[in-house]
Amino acid sequence: MGTQIAAKSRVWSELRLSSPPRLQISISPNLTALAIIADALAGRQRGLPESWRKAIASQVGPLGQDAVRPLAVPGSSIAPDSIVPCSPTDGDVTVQSQVSALQDISPDALIRDLEQTFGPGTPPLHWRSAAERPERWLRGYAGALADVWTTTEPLWKRARPLLDREVERVGVAAVRGGHELLLGALSERIVYGERGLLISDLESSTFELGDRKLVLVPMLAGKDAVIVSLDSPDAVWIAYPVPGAGSLWRKPVAPAGDELSAILGPVRAHLLCALEQPMTMSMLSTDLQIAPSGLTYHCDRLRAGRLIMRERRGREVWITRTRRAEELLELFRR
Protein backbone atom coordinates (compact mmCIF):
# COMPACT_ATOMS: atom_id res chain seq x y z
CA MET A 1 0.00 0.00 0.00
CA GLY A 2 2.86 2.39 0.69
CA THR A 3 3.61 5.20 3.09
CA GLN A 4 0.85 7.64 4.01
CA ILE A 5 1.45 11.35 4.60
CA ALA A 6 -1.81 11.65 6.49
CA ALA A 7 -4.17 14.40 5.46
CA LYS A 8 -6.46 16.50 7.61
CA SER A 9 -10.00 15.40 6.80
CA ARG A 10 -13.14 13.67 8.09
CA VAL A 11 -12.00 10.32 6.67
CA TRP A 12 -10.13 7.92 8.95
CA SER A 13 -7.69 5.08 8.61
CA GLU A 14 -8.10 2.58 11.43
CA LEU A 15 -5.41 0.59 13.21
CA ARG A 16 -7.16 -2.02 15.34
CA LEU A 17 -5.54 -3.19 18.57
CA SER A 18 -6.67 -6.48 20.09
CA SER A 19 -4.18 -6.27 22.97
CA PRO A 20 -1.73 -3.73 24.46
CA PRO A 21 0.84 -2.99 21.73
CA ARG A 22 4.57 -3.65 21.93
CA LEU A 23 5.79 -0.05 21.91
CA GLN A 24 9.16 1.08 20.63
CA ILE A 25 10.56 4.55 19.90
CA SER A 26 12.92 5.62 17.12
CA ILE A 27 14.75 8.94 16.86
CA SER A 28 14.90 9.12 13.07
CA PRO A 29 15.33 12.62 11.62
CA ASN A 30 14.77 11.31 8.10
CA LEU A 31 11.03 11.54 8.76
CA THR A 32 11.38 15.07 10.07
CA ALA A 33 12.97 15.99 6.74
CA LEU A 34 10.11 14.29 4.86
CA ALA A 35 7.44 16.08 6.92
CA ILE A 36 9.10 19.44 6.30
CA ILE A 37 9.35 18.71 2.57
CA ALA A 38 5.62 17.89 2.41
CA ASP A 39 4.76 21.07 4.32
CA ALA A 40 7.21 23.60 2.87
CA LEU A 41 7.64 22.36 -0.69
CA ALA A 42 4.79 20.04 -1.67
CA GLY A 43 1.97 22.24 -0.40
CA ARG A 44 0.48 20.07 2.38
CA GLN A 45 0.72 22.74 5.05
CA ARG A 46 0.78 21.27 8.53
CA GLY A 47 1.75 24.11 10.84
CA LEU A 48 5.28 25.05 9.76
CA PRO A 49 5.83 28.81 10.22
CA GLU A 50 5.83 30.76 6.98
CA SER A 51 9.34 32.07 7.58
CA TRP A 52 10.62 28.49 7.69
CA ARG A 53 8.69 27.55 4.57
CA LYS A 54 10.37 30.39 2.68
CA ALA A 55 13.82 29.60 4.04
CA ILE A 56 13.54 25.91 3.19
CA ALA A 57 12.10 26.56 -0.27
CA SER A 58 15.06 28.82 -1.00
CA GLN A 59 17.49 25.97 -0.35
CA VAL A 60 16.03 23.46 -2.83
CA GLY A 61 16.75 23.69 -6.54
CA PRO A 62 14.32 23.13 -9.43
CA LEU A 63 15.08 19.40 -9.73
CA GLY A 64 14.25 18.84 -6.07
CA GLN A 65 11.18 21.05 -6.23
CA ASP A 66 9.83 18.96 -9.13
CA ALA A 67 10.57 15.67 -7.39
CA VAL A 68 8.67 16.46 -4.17
CA ARG A 69 5.43 17.74 -5.75
CA PRO A 70 3.74 14.29 -5.90
CA LEU A 71 4.11 13.84 -2.13
CA ALA A 72 1.15 16.06 -1.23
CA VAL A 73 -1.12 16.17 -4.26
CA PRO A 74 -4.72 17.04 -3.26
CA GLY A 75 -6.97 14.03 -2.81
CA SER A 76 -4.25 11.43 -2.31
CA SER A 77 -2.18 10.43 0.72
CA ILE A 78 -0.51 7.29 -0.65
CA ALA A 79 3.11 7.29 -1.81
CA PRO A 80 5.49 4.46 -2.77
CA ASP A 81 7.67 3.10 0.01
CA SER A 82 10.71 4.41 -1.87
CA ILE A 83 10.14 7.79 -0.23
CA VAL A 84 11.24 6.10 3.03
CA PRO A 85 13.78 3.48 1.91
CA CYS A 86 15.19 3.24 5.44
CA SER A 87 12.44 2.17 7.84
CA PRO A 88 12.59 3.35 11.48
CA THR A 89 11.37 -0.06 12.62
CA ASP A 90 14.91 -1.43 12.86
CA GLY A 91 16.51 1.52 14.68
CA ASP A 92 17.27 5.20 14.28
CA VAL A 93 17.67 6.50 10.73
CA THR A 94 19.73 9.57 9.84
CA VAL A 95 19.03 11.83 6.89
CA GLN A 96 22.44 10.93 5.47
CA SER A 97 21.61 7.21 5.43
CA GLN A 98 18.24 7.98 3.83
CA VAL A 99 19.92 10.01 1.08
CA SER A 100 22.47 7.24 0.49
CA ALA A 101 19.71 4.62 0.29
CA LEU A 102 17.86 6.72 -2.30
CA GLN A 103 21.03 7.04 -4.35
CA ASP A 104 21.35 3.24 -4.31
CA ILE A 105 17.81 2.56 -5.56
CA SER A 106 17.80 1.53 -9.20
CA PRO A 107 15.30 3.08 -11.62
CA ASP A 108 13.80 -0.39 -12.19
CA ALA A 109 13.25 -0.81 -8.45
CA LEU A 110 11.35 2.48 -8.30
CA ILE A 111 9.15 1.35 -11.20
CA ARG A 112 8.38 -1.90 -9.38
CA ASP A 113 7.57 0.04 -6.21
CA LEU A 114 5.14 2.28 -8.11
CA GLU A 115 3.45 -0.80 -9.59
CA GLN A 116 3.19 -2.43 -6.17
CA THR A 117 1.66 0.74 -4.71
CA PHE A 118 -0.73 1.71 -7.49
CA GLY A 119 -1.12 -1.50 -9.48
CA PRO A 120 0.23 -2.44 -12.92
CA GLY A 121 0.00 -0.05 -15.81
CA THR A 122 0.19 3.72 -15.79
CA PRO A 123 0.46 5.22 -12.27
CA PRO A 124 -1.66 8.20 -11.14
CA LEU A 125 -0.99 11.42 -12.99
CA HIS A 126 1.02 13.00 -10.18
CA TRP A 127 3.48 10.05 -10.15
CA ARG A 128 3.73 9.74 -13.91
CA SER A 129 6.85 11.91 -14.24
CA ALA A 130 8.65 9.66 -11.70
CA ALA A 131 7.63 6.57 -13.67
CA GLU A 132 8.79 8.10 -16.94
CA ARG A 133 12.11 9.42 -15.60
CA PRO A 134 12.81 7.40 -12.42
CA GLU A 135 16.53 8.17 -12.25
CA ARG A 136 15.83 11.91 -12.41
CA TRP A 137 13.15 11.63 -9.71
CA LEU A 138 15.41 9.69 -7.35
CA ARG A 139 18.23 12.19 -7.83
CA GLY A 140 15.94 15.16 -7.29
CA TYR A 141 14.25 13.73 -4.20
CA ALA A 142 17.57 12.74 -2.59
CA GLY A 143 18.91 16.22 -3.28
CA ALA A 144 15.82 17.85 -1.78
CA LEU A 145 16.21 15.84 1.44
CA ALA A 146 19.86 16.84 1.74
CA ASP A 147 19.11 20.51 1.03
CA VAL A 148 16.27 20.64 3.54
CA TRP A 149 18.45 19.10 6.21
CA THR A 150 21.10 21.80 5.71
CA THR A 151 18.57 24.31 7.03
CA THR A 152 16.87 22.08 9.61
CA GLU A 153 19.75 20.28 11.31
CA PRO A 154 20.70 23.14 13.71
CA LEU A 155 17.12 23.20 15.00
CA TRP A 156 17.12 19.40 15.34
CA LYS A 157 20.18 19.64 17.59
CA ARG A 158 18.36 22.14 19.80
CA ALA A 159 15.42 19.73 20.01
CA ARG A 160 17.49 17.07 21.78
CA PRO A 161 16.02 17.75 25.27
CA LEU A 162 12.49 17.40 23.90
CA LEU A 163 13.40 14.14 22.18
CA ASP A 164 15.06 12.78 25.33
CA ARG A 165 11.93 13.62 27.31
CA GLU A 166 9.78 11.82 24.73
CA VAL A 167 11.97 8.71 24.90
CA GLU A 168 11.37 8.66 28.66
CA ARG A 169 7.61 9.21 28.26
CA VAL A 170 7.21 6.36 25.77
CA GLY A 171 9.43 4.13 27.89
CA VAL A 172 7.25 4.66 30.96
CA ALA A 173 4.10 3.86 28.98
CA ALA A 174 5.70 0.71 27.55
CA VAL A 175 6.76 -0.57 30.97
CA ARG A 176 3.91 0.56 33.19
CA GLY A 177 0.99 0.50 30.77
CA GLY A 178 -1.19 3.45 29.92
CA HIS A 179 -0.72 3.14 26.18
CA GLU A 180 -4.24 4.51 25.61
CA LEU A 181 -3.32 7.88 27.08
CA LEU A 182 -0.01 7.97 25.25
CA LEU A 183 -1.36 7.04 21.82
CA GLY A 184 -4.41 9.26 22.17
CA ALA A 185 -2.21 12.29 22.81
CA LEU A 186 0.22 11.92 19.90
CA SER A 187 -1.61 14.39 17.68
CA GLU A 188 -4.99 16.07 17.29
CA ARG A 189 -5.29 14.01 14.12
CA ILE A 190 -4.95 10.68 15.95
CA VAL A 191 -7.81 9.45 18.16
CA TYR A 192 -7.80 6.43 20.44
CA GLY A 193 -11.18 4.80 19.81
CA GLU A 194 -12.99 1.71 21.00
CA ARG A 195 -11.06 -0.69 18.75
CA GLY A 196 -7.74 1.14 18.41
CA LEU A 197 -6.34 4.18 16.62
CA LEU A 198 -8.17 6.38 14.14
CA ILE A 199 -5.85 8.47 11.94
CA SER A 200 -7.19 11.40 9.93
CA ASP A 201 -6.65 10.63 6.25
CA LEU A 202 -7.93 11.20 2.72
CA GLU A 203 -8.51 7.52 1.99
CA SER A 204 -10.21 5.14 4.41
CA SER A 205 -8.45 1.87 5.26
CA THR A 206 -8.40 -0.65 8.09
CA PHE A 207 -5.48 -2.66 9.48
CA GLU A 208 -5.01 -5.09 12.36
CA LEU A 209 -1.89 -4.51 14.43
CA GLY A 210 -1.87 -8.15 15.52
CA ASP A 211 1.43 -9.13 17.09
CA ARG A 212 3.41 -6.53 15.17
CA LYS A 213 5.34 -3.94 17.15
CA LEU A 214 4.27 -0.30 17.08
CA VAL A 215 7.18 2.12 16.53
CA LEU A 216 6.67 5.76 17.48
CA VAL A 217 8.84 8.36 15.73
CA PRO A 218 8.76 11.89 17.19
CA MET A 219 9.39 14.57 14.57
CA LEU A 220 10.36 18.21 14.59
CA ALA A 221 7.49 19.32 12.35
CA GLY A 222 4.32 21.38 12.17
CA LYS A 223 1.70 20.57 14.79
CA ASP A 224 -0.57 18.76 12.29
CA ALA A 225 2.13 16.64 10.62
CA VAL A 226 1.55 12.87 10.75
CA ILE A 227 3.23 10.17 8.62
CA VAL A 228 2.33 6.50 9.00
CA SER A 229 3.15 3.11 7.56
CA LEU A 230 0.51 0.58 8.54
CA ASP A 231 0.95 -2.38 6.19
CA SER A 232 4.47 -3.68 6.79
CA PRO A 233 4.40 -7.35 7.88
CA ASP A 234 6.77 -6.85 10.82
CA ALA A 235 5.89 -3.49 12.33
CA VAL A 236 3.77 -0.36 12.14
CA TRP A 237 5.31 3.06 12.54
CA ILE A 238 3.72 6.41 13.29
CA ALA A 239 5.65 9.69 13.04
CA TYR A 240 4.17 12.65 14.94
CA PRO A 241 5.30 16.08 16.23
CA VAL A 242 7.38 15.81 19.38
CA PRO A 243 5.59 17.57 22.28
CA GLY A 244 6.90 21.10 22.71
CA ALA A 245 8.14 21.40 19.13
CA GLY A 246 6.20 24.63 18.67
CA SER A 247 8.50 26.43 21.09
CA LEU A 248 11.50 25.74 18.86
CA TRP A 249 10.00 27.43 15.79
CA ARG A 250 9.80 30.71 17.67
CA LYS A 251 12.85 32.89 17.68
CA PRO A 252 14.91 32.06 20.81
CA VAL A 253 16.23 34.62 23.23
CA ALA A 254 19.95 35.18 22.77
CA PRO A 255 21.79 32.53 24.84
CA ALA A 256 23.71 34.01 27.75
CA GLY A 257 22.92 37.40 26.22
CA ASP A 258 25.16 39.52 28.40
CA GLU A 259 28.25 37.41 27.75
CA LEU A 260 27.59 37.07 24.02
CA SER A 261 26.86 40.79 23.73
CA ALA A 262 30.11 41.56 25.52
CA ILE A 263 31.97 39.70 22.76
CA LEU A 264 29.99 40.69 19.67
CA GLY A 265 28.03 43.75 20.74
CA PRO A 266 24.27 43.64 21.45
CA VAL A 267 23.13 44.25 17.85
CA ARG A 268 25.37 41.57 16.34
CA ALA A 269 24.53 39.11 19.11
CA HIS A 270 20.82 39.64 18.42
CA LEU A 271 21.41 39.34 14.67
CA LEU A 272 23.31 36.09 15.02
CA CYS A 273 20.60 34.57 17.23
CA ALA A 274 17.90 35.63 14.77
CA LEU A 275 19.45 33.47 12.05
CA GLU A 276 17.86 30.20 13.17
CA GLN A 277 17.24 29.67 9.46
CA PRO A 278 18.64 31.48 6.40
CA MET A 279 17.05 34.91 5.94
CA THR A 280 17.26 37.67 3.36
CA MET A 281 18.64 41.07 4.16
CA SER A 282 15.15 42.54 3.85
CA MET A 283 13.71 39.91 6.21
CA LEU A 284 16.43 40.64 8.78
CA SER A 285 15.97 44.38 8.45
CA THR A 286 12.24 44.04 9.16
CA ASP A 287 12.70 41.46 11.90
CA LEU A 288 15.37 43.37 13.79
CA GLN A 289 14.06 46.84 12.91
CA ILE A 290 17.47 47.93 11.67
CA ALA A 291 17.96 50.24 8.69
CA PRO A 292 19.48 48.45 5.67
CA SER A 293 22.67 50.51 5.82
CA GLY A 294 23.21 49.65 9.48
CA LEU A 295 22.41 45.99 8.88
CA THR A 296 24.97 45.84 6.07
CA TYR A 297 27.62 47.25 8.41
CA HIS A 298 26.94 44.66 11.12
CA CYS A 299 26.79 41.81 8.60
CA ASP A 300 30.15 42.91 7.23
CA ARG A 301 31.65 42.62 10.71
CA LEU A 302 30.12 39.18 11.32
CA ARG A 303 31.28 38.00 7.93
CA ALA A 304 34.81 39.19 8.70
CA GLY A 305 34.65 37.05 11.85
CA ARG A 306 33.55 34.04 9.74
CA LEU A 307 30.25 33.87 11.62
CA ILE A 308 27.91 34.36 8.66
CA MET A 309 27.89 33.67 4.93
CA ARG A 310 26.16 35.76 2.26
CA GLU A 311 24.80 34.33 -0.97
CA ARG A 312 23.03 36.17 -3.77
CA ARG A 313 20.06 34.35 -5.29
CA GLY A 314 18.46 36.42 -7.98
CA ARG A 315 17.62 39.81 -6.52
CA GLU A 316 17.93 38.72 -2.89
CA VAL A 317 20.98 38.30 -0.65
CA TRP A 318 20.54 35.43 1.82
CA ILE A 319 22.38 35.31 5.16
CA THR A 320 23.29 32.03 6.86
CA ARG A 321 25.14 31.24 10.08
CA THR A 322 28.41 29.35 9.69
CA ARG A 323 29.44 26.27 11.63
CA ARG A 324 31.80 28.50 13.59
CA ALA A 325 28.78 30.58 14.67
CA GLU A 326 26.82 27.46 15.67
CA GLU A 327 29.71 26.32 17.86
CA LEU A 328 29.93 29.76 19.47
CA LEU A 329 26.21 29.84 20.25
CA GLU A 330 26.28 26.31 21.60
CA LEU A 331 29.08 27.32 23.95
CA PHE A 332 26.94 30.07 25.43
CA ARG A 333 23.86 27.87 25.70
CA ARG A 334 25.59 25.47 28.08
Image: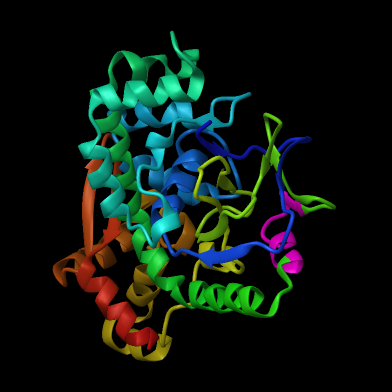
Residue 17 painted magenta: no
Q: Residue at x 41, y 23 (%)?
A: 114
Residue farthest toward the front in the current orientation of the protein: 211
Answer yes or no: is residue 285 visible.
no
Residue farthest toward the right in the current orientation of the protein: 194
Q: Residue at x 63, y 79 (%)?
A: 175
* Picture quadrant where residue 259 is located: bottom left
Rendered location of residue 270, percent (x, y):
40, 73
Is the residue 118 above or below the residue 27 in the image?
Answer: above
Is the residue 281 above or below the residue 8 in the image?
Answer: below
Magenta residues?
180-191
For the C terminus, give its image quadrant: bottom left
Rendered location of residue 115, percent (x, y):
42, 19
Is the residue 117 above or below the residue 150 in the image?
Answer: above
Q: Residue at x 53, y 33 (%)?
A: 43
Rendered location of residue 318, percent (x, y):
30, 49
Give left or right: position of 334 versus 7: left
Rendered location of residue 219, percent (x, y):
51, 58
Give left or right: position of 213 versus 86: right
Answer yes or no: is residue 21 visible.
yes
Give left or right: position of 161 versus 180: left
Q: Residue at x 44, y 64 (%)?
A: 27
Is the residue 235 above or below the residue 329 in the image?
Answer: above
